[in-house]
Amino acid sequence: MHVANHAGRACLVIDWHPDGTIRLADIEGASDGRFGPDPMTLLEQWEPFTQWGRTAAAKPTHRASNTELSAPIPRPTQVLAVGTNYTDHAAEVGQNPTQAIFSKLPTCIIGPAATVTLPTGTVDWEVELVAVIGRPAFQIPAAEAREYIAGFMVGQDLSERASQFAGELPQFTLAKSRPGFGPTGPWLTTLDELADPTDLAICCQRNGESVQSSRTSAMIQGVDEVVAFISAAVPLLPGDLVFTGTPSGVGYGRDPQLFLAPGDHLTSMIEGLGQIDLDFVAGEERR
């Protein structure tokens, strides 16, 4: 299944077309009220919902453009992320590949087609596979982690590099939690839709030029291991998001360095999950 958020209502994606038109079925209507319209409430009923969704003969109720979709998981309680989870990315930014976990604050989460204000001239891109937690998970083994994952989305871990590396210790959370710095979407894709959810093509284009291109199988720690590692210390809740790391090609690691500018367009794509599209405008940082 593909579950989208249209006008604040959870919808099943019936199909989509190259022109950006999507046919949707309103979940509350299709289920005769068994499941409500709030995407977050849906996550709290994920197991019975997926059982219903696999057999439901939902008919499209309306059409929409992908630019009209909101964040599939609009109000996550926790957003966790892992740094340097691809060897080539660790090398390009001069860091050791480790399971360094940090938070992105939930207020940075936005949808798949948005305009983001650049607070400075040093904002960078990081396309990432985002796992959505579907069941409470605490101290789970990696071998069972898949049972706790509702599905995947495309994400961007936008990062303001000047503040991130200004001090003696990196300032990850604040640098990566500015408004609009957590785009996700275009919808949540359940794992049964993917032939091999551990090996997906992942790429990012800036103004039509490829800047990142890899496969999720190149992760140092796979999604299951990342979720298990986090859950060893932190109870994960339905609707929590886990950003799983980015491959090489970020602007900070280039010589000379390259950052996003007003007027830029960023497209982030993951095989089987769709794409998210961002435009950028100038802003002014307040201190």
Image (cartoon, rainbow, N blue to C red):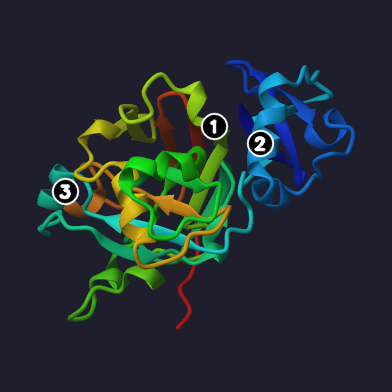
The quadrant holding residue 170 is bottom left
**Where residue 98 appears, x then y in whole percent?**
17, 58
In the rendered image, the quadrant that contains the N terminus is top right
The picture quadrant where one finds residue 94 is: bottom left
Q: Residue at x 33, y 41 (%)?
A: 143
Residue 218, numbered label: none
Q: Nearer the viewer, residue 100 or 104?
A: 100
Tell me the quadrant of the picture where the C terminus can be found. Answer: bottom left
Residue 20 can be seen, yes or no: yes
User: Mark 1 = which residue?
Assistant: 189
Q: Earlier in the sequence, mark 1 or mark 3?
A: 1
- Mark 1 crowdedness (10 Å alpha carbons): few <14, some 14-19, many ≥20: many
For label 2, the SS is strand
- Where is residue 15 shown, x and y percent of the image? 66, 18
- Residue position for label 3: 254
Label 3 CA crowd tier, 10 Å (few <14, some 14–19, many 20+) = few
Nearer-the-camera pick, 165 or 247: 247
Asked whether, in this view, residue 194 is left or right of residue 69, the answer is: left
Instruction: Give 199 or 87, whichever is nearer the viewer.
Output: 199
- Label 2, on which residue? 4
Question: Which of the two labelled residues, at mark 2 and mark 3, occupies the earlier sequence position?
Answer: 2
* Front residue of 120 and 161: 161
| Crowd rating for badge 2 (residues with CA inside 10 Å; few <14, some 14–19, many 20+) | many
Task: Identify the residue at horizontal 69%, vertical 46% (top origin).
Answer: 45
Q: Earlier in the sequence, mark 2 or mark 1?
A: 2
Q: Is residue 52 above or below residue 252?
A: above
| Tag 2 near tag 1, CB within 8 Å | no
Name the side, left or right, on which 175 lies relative to 106: left
Type of the residue with mark 1: Thr
Q: Amino acid at mark 3?
A: Arg
